[in-house]
Amino acid sequence: MAYIMIVDDDADLANTTAKVLETDRHQVSIQLDTHGAGKALEERVPELMILDVMFPEDSSAGFDFARTLRKDERFTTMPILMLTAINEKYPFGFSASDIDEDWLPVTEFMEKPVDFDVLRKKVADMLGG
Amino acid sequence: MTSRTQSATYRLPLPPHTEKEHDVDPTLFDDAFLGGLVLRNVRWYCDFRWLVILVFATYGALSFVPGMYASLGLQEQAWWTFHAALTLTLLNIVYLVHARALRRLPAGRGAELNLWTQIVVDLIIVSVTVHQVGSVETPIAHVYLFHIVLSCIFLPGGQSLLVTLLATLFYVSCVALETLGVLPEAGVFARPLLRRQAMVEPLTVSLHVAATVLVWWVVWYLTSHLSFLLMQRDRALLQANHRLVTLQKEKMQHMLHTTHELKAPFAAIQANTQLLQKGYCGELPAEASDVVGRIAQRSRRLAATIQEMLQLANLQSGGERPPSRQRVDLVPVLRWSVDQVKQIAAERSIEIVEDIEECHVCGVPDHLKMLFMNLLANATYYSYPNGTVHLRAHRLPDESAITVAVEDHGIGIPADKLPHVFEEYYHTNEAVRHNPNSTGLGLAIVNQIARMHGLHLSVSSTPGEGTTVTVRVPVPLT
């Protein structure tokens, strides 16, 4: 059981993901923007963050948020699973092998739509590791 | 302190194409840009001056060849040329050292000061040369034209006019001082009579000077006018280029958002159908589960179609980053492509066998990835279950290109339908029966990329036995 924070502007998708993760007895908090997530992080640091890339006000807010978090020593080791329908570097899809510490400082990457069985396994692996 | 409730006004900027044709974005010609330009001109003047120094030194050195200048009717003693060469060399070194120091801050006025010092000092040295060679009896005065023409090309606006005025002033002063006897007699000709004959009539001298100066002013007018027209064209081109780059970026951003906006709802639909299908909301009756399954499948297909339509539209419109070709390591590109289809292959129990030679090609990595991923996906979709897909990459014997072949042992394509498989939305009946979820766009994307990059692509197929697609990718020039 872990505390997981989902940062995604799509409330529908975030709620669905939360429902799936809660079946594994995780405690899930949902933040609809990176600003709210920043505030929530001050109160409690999650054991895993699921982060979207594109937000309505900024199409790369997720990338920027991940880079900012990695500069703060409180969050340098916090696992981040990035979920997105699209991204700037590979506009039509890319894979986890494209993760590079400078460009995309996250632990894992999954492209939407995600298979929930795969997501649960990935979350379990990331928390276990 | 600004209050959040304070009222604010925002003026919507006009799109770039509504700007006046010759309005130039001021940021394109900022101080740093212009400073850098002047600095380049400073170096160019210095480079050209080395040639002038060489001419002076050579002329002086040749005076040591006995009888050579005498046979040409010229004075043998030419020490002044060594003085001029030495002075110019020292000055050139000073200019270059100063320019090097200015490289760190090209935005200042230092480069302009350097350039103007060069021009004024050069005009003085040209005047000394004109006096030494013969201000009236030789055509040496036209040496001033070098500076007039160069200033028309390199200096902005009215500055070339100032150079022409200075040249006129220096030349007229030189001749006037000679005529008044303030300057000592000089000249390259050995027989002073020739010089004296030319100088005897002040009116002749005046006419000669006036004609010379008139030629300079005509040259100044023509060159500065042409230079102005060219500069205007340059600015218009720069502006047009800037506008195109901006539009390209906007287009790319638009495609990105469109893809996201169209794809994101399908992600939510699929997430919700998964909740129902996988029992997160309790058990569903069999019929309801079947209906949800069909919704999920159609939604997946529509999402894939939208993504491929956008991908193809983007390639066709050249909306993606300009295809600047580069040296690409083909192995990671192919491995990436295989990774993308591993899941589809696993679902169909299809093995992908790689036989890839280490090699580099010339291309655009993202486009190559898209091309090979689509070929591999097609081979996997149209293989029979438990089949094998071969991916081979080898150098041609003459090393001029790499051939990448994707071979499956699947349903194959009838010969009469082969020419159509690269058309958009074309499906053979056999293909629809085997894979009803195909978008019909995968090979159209392959075709578009191959056309963009001039890649030779061939397909050979036997119905019921399989298909091989071969792509020839050029190797980088070494």
Image (cartoon, coloured by chain):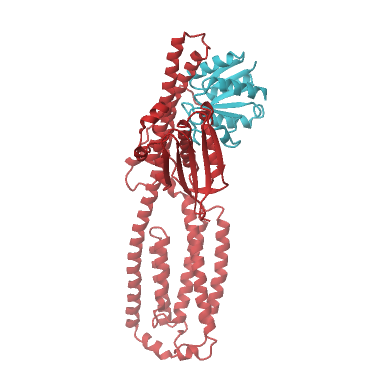
Chain colours: A cyan, B red
Number of numbered tags placed on the structure image: 0
In the image, is residue B215 above or below residue A3?
below
Q: Residue B140 in the image: state x and y as whole percent.
A: 41, 78
Looking at the rendering, which quadrant does residue B298 occupy? top left
In the image, is residue A51 above or below residue B19?
above
| Pick the front one: B436 or B130 | B436
Looking at the image, residue B50 sits to the left or right of residue B300; the answer is: right
Q: Residue at x 53, y 47 (%)?
A: B394
The answer to whether residue B250 of the structure is visible from this angle is no
Q: Residue B270 in the image: state x and y as whole percent.
A: 47, 20
Q: Residue at x 56, y 43 (%)?
A: B356
Looking at the rendering, which quadrant does residue B439 occupy? top left
Q: Residue A85 in the image: state x and y as whole percent.
A: 48, 27
Q: Residue B425 in the image: state x and y as whole percent.
A: 35, 32
Looking at the image, residue B266 sits to the left or right of residue B54; the answer is: left
Q: Residue at x 67, y 29 (%)?
A: A73
| Pick the front one: B438 or B104 | B438
In the image, is residue A85 above or below residue B229?
above
| Pick the front one: B398 or B160 | B398
Looking at the rendering, which quadrant does residue B314 occupy? top left
The answer to whether residue B137 of the structure is visible from this angle is yes
